[in-house]
Image (cartoon, coloured by chain):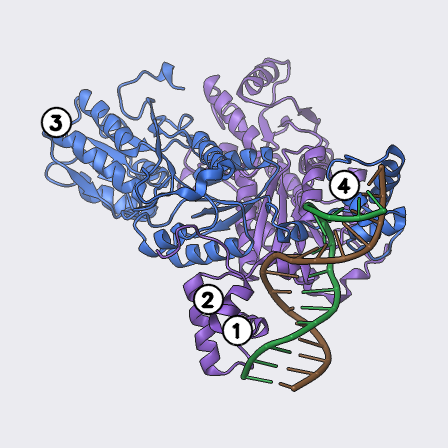
Chain colours: A purple, B blue, C green, D brown
DNA sequence: CTGTTAGCGCATTCAT
DNA sequence: ATGAATGCGCTAACAG
């Protein structure tokens, strides 16, 4: 190691040491066109020796792309969002860019703050799973963005912001219709965080399917952890007309309910069938294995990122007129039938 | 919405509209000291109206902090790293900074490239889980960094790079000694990715504990998915002296083995005890629940980030002499005893 | 093929 | 309390 105190070399440093002008160095680091082989070699050598890396900020200031994409998600510890993020990151990297990740905790204030910080950094585009699909302030701010925005998992209301989401309504409906077709009649819908777009859509799907079949709707949105899951189950099971099946609206809720069911020694699916929205790692390993509505998680992240880059490349992007239709890509979900809904042999568990 | 084509306003724009000089605006956005109340209000109004956000690149160019931290991890879909990332992100945010996430896929080349890109962006510091703890090139590049670096989960060899890791050796040893104390004698060690630092340390812990007890060491590092898990198990179980317990070296391996065990209808822990390194979401929900060595995941991410910021604030950081001791923080692991190791009643499952 | 120069947006002297 | 001028590192005219 030659230098004791590392520092960041500049174009000028390289130029001086190589005995050329700054323009030449600039040419070298930008592809080496119009530079004689000898000069090229000499400059390259100095760059190598100095460990020179161009200062991206200077480039940005010159009006170039920042080569960064902002991502705002409720959480990255959540496997749904971390998988989306991973898929998006692949696309971002393929476009020679970097992903800046911020966490909103589903809090609109934090989210707006993130938006501002990302704006200050002049990211080239933005991917976000909005905490509140109806938030006016967010919608307004988004409409003033100087860069393209794509929302995923949840849309943004009243805005020309394209979104990539699962067909939550259809997926939930399919699950319920499946249960109904197998004879279940009193299907209880369990969940939490009722203000989330996805949850609302799924509830809507449940309602519709129940209405079609002329079955009574029964919804309990009080589940936030295993304790509340247990007490809710206890209550519903000891009612006059207890449910014969439960439909859980969300990954974690399915797990809480599963654990509570096991704790309460309720036989699944014999006494109570279980169907969850969202697949999870060990759903197929549990006994009984859990039937779920599976979302194309990886595709959501990937397509959202691809859509974003296509907008970034679109020179006409600026002309988003208020009349232009909102692009909403709805991805199909898939019913994964395992044993917890009682209509499937163990052998075909997958 | 007033403007049809949003753009990024500049300090000068604000100054012009507010009828003041750029210096005044600069003062306002930096705390508003030495500005008369009226001017302040007027400038603030224009800033609001324009949705002005200072250009961070210009600030960086002026020699200010970028307010970004780079994070390089093998994967973000992996729950271990996404949890670390979430913990780190909290600290980063608390320091009013942004987290740039890159994925190395455990590939040294990709990792070096990420390092360079982050350098170009002049991040204020770097957190990384090095793909290869012995990589010379990485170590060299890291030593030339102009900003502090902290590694986590895995150390960096021969370098004055501080690291925050679990005590893998001790944790594995504790698990094995636990099994031994309960009478298991033929303990098979199963895993994959043998070149990972963490895996090597755990194997070392296993070896030591077995050696202490005078028991025969048996290691199979061929497990990469459920299929290989099944065939490995089949082989070992049909051997002359089959194992009476298995110790799995890694999160996913534990799951593969668990699934394979269930597939092969091997009774756990009756026929074969199971102990895994790394806890996972449903470990306590499975039947039998899986005993594991639990790492303080959140603490790893948090402490690494805190350490990084403390280095960034340390003005004497530059004076890292070759003789200075390498800071290595080793965090204790915890044995979580559930039913799969056969020494614990179901009632105390946690 | 190569060098000189201006200016991106901002914070920072130094005046006033 | 305020403003004019300078320069951070780089690229893009332009000139040679």
- Tell me where residue A203 appears, x and y as whole percent: 69, 33
Mark pair 2, 1: CA separation = 10 Å
Of the pair A248 and A36, the residue shown nearer to us: A36
- Give the CA separation, mark 2 to mark 3: 57 Å
Q: Nearer the viewer, mark 4 or mark 2?
A: 4
Considering only vertical position in the picture, is A97 above or below A277?
A: below
| Residue designated by label 4 | B27
Label 2 lies in what chain?
Answer: A
In the rendered picture of this protein, how many numbered marks are placed on residues? Answer: 4
User: Residue A28 — which label?
Assistant: 1
**Residues marked 2 and 3 touching at CB (< 8 Å):** no
Q: Is residue B267 visible?
A: no
Along the viewing direction, whichever of A213 and B112 lies nearer the viewer: B112
Q: Quadrant of residue B28?
A: top right
Both labels 2 and 1 in a single chain: yes
The residue that label 2 is drawn on is A47
Residue contact between numbered discs 2 and 1, judged by CB atoms under 8 Å = yes
User: Which of the 4 quarters of the picture holds residue A206?
Assistant: top right
Circle 4 marks a residue in which chain?
B
Q: Which label's residue is closer to the chain start, 3 or 4?
A: 4
* Circles 2 and 3 on the same chain: no
Tag nearer the camera, 4 or 1 = 4
**Secondary structure category for the residue under label 4:** helix
Q: Position of residue A175 (x, y in %)?
A: 61, 39
Reading the image, the residue beneath label 3 is B213
What is the C-alpha distance between the residues marked 3 and 4?
70 Å
């Amino acid at each position: 190691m030659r230098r004791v105190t590392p520092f960041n070399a500049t174009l000028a440093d390289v130029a001086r040491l190589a005995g050329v002008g700054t323009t030449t160095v600039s040419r070298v680091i930008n592809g080496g066109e119009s530079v004689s082989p000898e000069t090229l070699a000499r400059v390259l050598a100095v760059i190598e020796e100095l460990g020179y890396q161009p200062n991206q900020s200077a480039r940005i200031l010159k009006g170039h792309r920042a080569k960064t994409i902002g991502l705002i998600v409720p959480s990255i510890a959540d496997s749904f969002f971390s998988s989306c993020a991973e898929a998006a990151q692949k696309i971002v990297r393929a476009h020679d860019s970097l992903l800046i990740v911020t966490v909103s905790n589903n809090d609109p204030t934090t989210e707006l703050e993130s938006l501002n910080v990302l704006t200050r950094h002049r990211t080239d585009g933005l991917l976000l799973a909005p905490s509140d699909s109806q938030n006016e302030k967010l919608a307004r701010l988004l409409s003033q963005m100087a860069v393209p925005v794509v929302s995923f998992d949840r849309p943004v209301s009243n805005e020309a912001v394209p979104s990539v989401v699962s067909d939550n309504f259809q997926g939930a409906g399919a699950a319920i219709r499946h249960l109904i077709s197998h004879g279940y009649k009193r299907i209880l819908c369990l969940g939490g965080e009722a203000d989330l777009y996805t949850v609302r859509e799924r509830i809507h799907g449940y309602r519709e399917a129940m209405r079609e079949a002329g079955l009574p709707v029964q919804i309990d949105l009080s589940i936030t952890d295993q304790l509340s899951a247990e007490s809710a189950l206890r209550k519903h099971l000891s009612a006059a007309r207890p449910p014969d099946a439960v439909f859980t609206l969300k990954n974690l809720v399915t797990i809480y309910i599963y654990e509570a069911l096991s704790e309460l020694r309720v036989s699944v699916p014999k006494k109570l069938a279980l169907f969850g929205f969202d697949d999870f790692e060990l759903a197929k390993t549990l006994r009984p294995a859990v039937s779920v509505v599976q979302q194309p998680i990886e595709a959501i992240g990937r397509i959202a990122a691809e859509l974003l880059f296509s907008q970034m490349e679109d020179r006409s992007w600026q002309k988003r007129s208020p009349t232009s239709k909102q692009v909403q890509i709805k991805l199909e979900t898939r019913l994964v039938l395992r044993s917890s809904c009682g209509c499937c042999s163990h052998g075909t568990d997958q």
